Amino acid sequence: MPEKSNKKVYTKEDLKKFRAELLQQKALILDELIKIRQEANKTIKDSTGDLSSFTLHMADMATDLYDREFALELAESERELLYSLDEAIKRIDAGSFGQCEMCDTCIPKQRLNAMPHAQYCISCQEKRETKKRK
């Protein structure tokens, strides 16, 4: 008797829905990245609304520097998510969307609805996270 495969091919309608969701998330992230960049590019004078040209207090400058660094870290996280979304769209085009990249089984639709760029089933994702912590 042949071994049962846990592979499931998603319908064209499912893939169309997932693609639309991925593109919508991508657009939101691109908008967020633009806002982050605009905020990070503001001068200290712009961000405080101070009209004088006198030097700001050191604490104000430190706070501003922290805010800029935080914005840049957030932008990096957003870029990583953007990359994941692009990769998921490529998987749709390649016909491998919804298959776990570790065990090659079908990623449940419920997981993909929650996280359409998921590359791994929950079991394999847990294994990866456990491995990272060690």
Image (spheres, grey):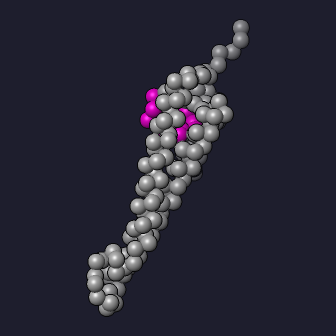
Residue at horizontal 42 percent and vertical 63 percent from the top: 36
**Quadrant position of residue 9:** top right
Horizontal arrangement in the rendering, residue 54 relative to residue 71 (left or right): left
The image shows residue 126 at horizontal and vertical percentages of 53, 39
Is 108 placed above or below 40 here?
above
Please name whichever residue, 73 or 4, is drawn nearer the observer in this view of the structure: 73
Is 64 placed above or below 133 here?
below
Is 39 placed above or below 82 here?
below
Please name whichever residue, 98 or 51, is drawn nearer the observer in this view of the structure: 51
Residue at horizontal 65 percent and vertical 30 percent from the top: 95
Q: Is residue 46 magenta?
A: no
Q: How many marks?
A: 0
The image shows residue 33 at horizontal and vertical percentages of 46, 58
Q: Hey, which residue is sitting farthest bottom in the picture?
A: 54
Is 105 placed above or below 134 here?
above
Q: Which residues are magenta?
A: 110-122
Horizontal arrangement in the rendering, residue 127 relative to residue 59 (left or right): right
Horizontal arrangement in the rendering, residue 78 relative to residue 4 (left or right): left
Residue 32 visible in the snapshot: yes
Q: Hey, which residue is sitting farthest top in the picture?
A: 1
Please name whichever residue, 104 or 10, is drawn nearer the observer in this view of the structure: 10
Residue at horizontal 28 percent and vertical 77 percent from the top: 49
The image shows residue 1 at horizontal and vertical percentages of 71, 8
Residue at horizontal 51 percent and vertical 60 percent from the top: 76
Please name whichever residue, 67 or 128, is drawn nearer the observer in this view of the structure: 67
Residue 111 visible in the snapshot: no
The image shows residue 102 at horizontal and vertical percentages of 64, 36
